Each structure stands twice: as structure tokens, then as C-alpha cells.
Image: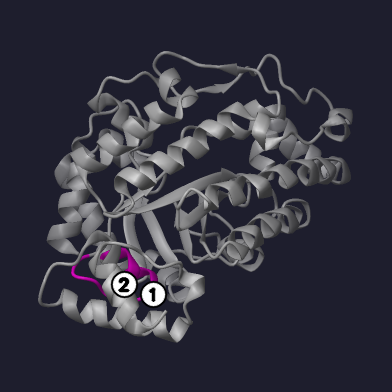
Amino acid sequence: MNLGRIMKSLSHGTLPPPREVPEPVLKLAASAISARGRISPLTSIERVFAALFHKEPDHVPVTTLVCSAARQIRNIGFKDMSLDGETAADVFSSGFEFIGGDMVVLLMDLSVEAADFGQDMIFPDNSTAHPDYANPAIKGVDDYGRLRPISLRDAPRMQEFLKLCRITVQRVGLRGLVGGFVFGPLGVLGMMRGAGNLLKDCMLYPAEVRKACETVTGVLVEYVEAQSETGVPAIAIDALYAGTNGLPKKVWESVEGPFVREISRAIKRRKLMVGVHNCGHNPFVDVQIKWMEPEVFSLAHLPDDCRTDLELKQKYGEAVTIIGHVPTPLLIHGTPQEVMDECRRQIDILAKGGGYILAPGCEYPPNIPLTNAFAMIHAARRFG
């Protein structure tokens, strides 16, 4: 694809698969888009494209990550959203149309993969689905070795997520970037074992946990390959336990690192962008970049080796596009003015030179008013 075709596709609101085009050509296209953004408004796709290639768009791109919070718009229940892909697509489409933004990151809840591996679930009326903690699928260390692969064709919740991807790309894909999502193998096992027990097992019985990671990863690779066929141009991998509230850095590298690398490479083979999401405290950004080689990194807290946002930008701003990281407690308790002030502070530090997308550090809290989501949209346009 030459530069003219890239510019033509962007003008019609489409994003060419980034790995099918030589990087110098993509950077040239991003520079041309950035220059045009100084004199006229860009489309959401153009805005994100410029930021991804570290050029400054007309204003900083923004995604509110409303996810299940958008079910308020049409009074859709948590359980209905979790179990039906078309209903979930109604939620995400409503959030995009009503609130706005430049990206949609698809997430039903974190129990999707574990449920298909046999974990019993509870679907509360007023909260997201979660495992039946009284009945974990992995009750002891020996159960890791008993875990068996499942067929993606016979995985109902993952199939509903794939339906969500297909429908949302059809509804939104020409006006904003739509991203897929997969929970990393340790995240899936944590849903089936309990986080505390899993982390202890990683320290005491790493070989057994790695065996289960291998089983889960084979299915997750097939899962991301299926997501790539829905039309999403990017997929985020959630490596929750790669941070100071999870495992020691070397332990995480030895237990989960090789398996998230396998998932990342499967995404790259399909010519999609790789994202990493980690909303844990002090995430190990350095080793997650090493193992997954992402284009974008979504985080809630500063990395373990950074003390300030400026240091975050200086250390990692060239390697990845940073997504985040408006604190979720501020979205819950703060006024719209306080949220806009924090957005402006982050924009002033992180948006210079591109490579930044304004967003919450994690999913927008599902049971609070949407007022502060609008505050983020307003801040991006006013201060970005």
C-alpha cells in the first residue's frame, strides 16, 4: 500500500492493517495527518493513527473505557451483557454514540475465558460477573495438571465475545478504532484458583502452574486468532500479575512471560497491533515490553521504575503509545472540574510529541454516573 492509498483510506475512516505497510510509509502518513490536523479537524481514526506513530494530532485522542457502565444508557442488566454478544454490542455502541471518544476497547468481564474452562460463575444483579469463590475449578496444586484444553467452537462465552467484536466493528469500526481483549493465562488461572492461592503456587510450585499456563495458552492463541477475523485492528493482553501487587519480576518472567509472548506473536502474525493492559500497582513495564513487544500500553499506576509521569514519558514514550491513566477513584469521587484538571495535567506531560491516548487507568466504574466520562471527552478537546 502506498502513501496515497493510506491517505485515501484514512479520509474514508478506515485504518490499514499496520503490519502490511512499511513503517517509514506509515510514519510519513502520520506526519501528513498531523500537519493537516493543524488546519482542520481530523477523524477519530486519523487522530488515533497519528498518536500511534508518535505524531501530534489536532487534539489528544481519548477513550473513556465505559464498557459495562454504558449499560445505564439503555437499562441493560449485567448478566444480559455478559452472556449475550449482541446485547453487549448494544451497550458498547450506545456508549460510543452517547459519550463519544476515538476508541472502543471491548470487555465483557474478566471471567469469560475461565467460565469456558469450567469455572462456576455468579451473575449479580448490580455488579459484574465473578467466579463462585466457594467452588474454585482448581482446588489444589494437583488440579493444574488435570486441566485440559477446550474447543473454541464449544466455548459459549468466548463465542459471544467474538460476536460482540464482529457487531461492534460493523457499527463503529469506520468511525473509531475498536480493540479486542484477552485475559492472560495467569489471569484465567487466577479466576479458577483464587488470586491469593495462585500467587502462592507460582512461588512454591512454578512447574505445575506453567503446565496449566501451557494448556490455557493454546486455547487463548486460537481465541485471539478468531478475534483477528472479526475486523478488530488491535487486541489487548491483560497481564495483571506483572506488578508489585502480583509476582516478583523474575518469577513473573519465568512463569507467564513465555506464554504471553506466544499470544502476542499470534496477534502479530495476523498483522494486528498488540496492546498490553495492566491496572495493577507499579507494573513491570520493562519486562512486559520485552516479552510482548506491544505498540500500546494501558496502565493505571506508574511503573515500578518511574516516580513521575515525566519519567514515564521519557523512559517509555518512544517504545509504546501510553494509554491512561486517570485514576478510577477520582472518577468515582471527583467533580467534573477535578477530573478535567487531572486530564489537563496528564495531557501537558504525556501528549507532547504524540504517543499518548487519554483514558482512565482501568474500566470506567460501572455503577457511577457517566458525568465524568463526558468531562474526559471535554478535557481532550479543550486541552489536548
* Callout 2 touching callout 1 (CB < 8 Å): yes
- Disc 1 target residue: 53
Q: Is residue 298 magenta?
A: no
Amino acid type, residue under disc 2 in the picture:
Ala
Q: 160 left or right of 243?
A: left
Say above or below: 337 vs 175. Answer: above
- Asked which quadrant contains residue 12, the reply is bottom left
Say above or below: 104 vs 140. Answer: below
At a point 59% along the width and 67% down the height, the residue shown is: 293
At a point 10% along the width and 77% down the height, the residue shown is: 39
Residue 89: give x, y in percent of width and height: 37, 34
Instruction: Estimate the spatial distance between the alpha carbons at disc 2 and disc 1, rounded to whole Å.
Output: 5 Å
Residue nearest the viewer, comparing 151 with 192: 151
In the picture as drawn, the residue positioned furthest to the left comes out as 39
Q: Residues within 10 Å of mark 1 (few under 14, many from 20)?
A: many
Q: Residues within 10 Å of mark 2 (few under 14, many from 20)?
A: many
Residue span colored magenta:
47-59
Say above or below: 295 vs 188. Answer: below
Say above or below: 31 vs 219. Answer: below
Residue nearest the viewer, comparing 155 with 124: 155
At a point 69% along the width and 42% down the height, the residue shown is: 186
Residue 268 visible in the shown view: yes
Q: Which mark is residue 50?
A: 2
Amino acid type, residue under disc 1 in the picture:
Phe
At a point 23% along the width and 34% down the height, the residue shown is: 370
Q: Is residue 57 magenta?
A: yes
Name the quarter where the C terminus is drawn: bottom left
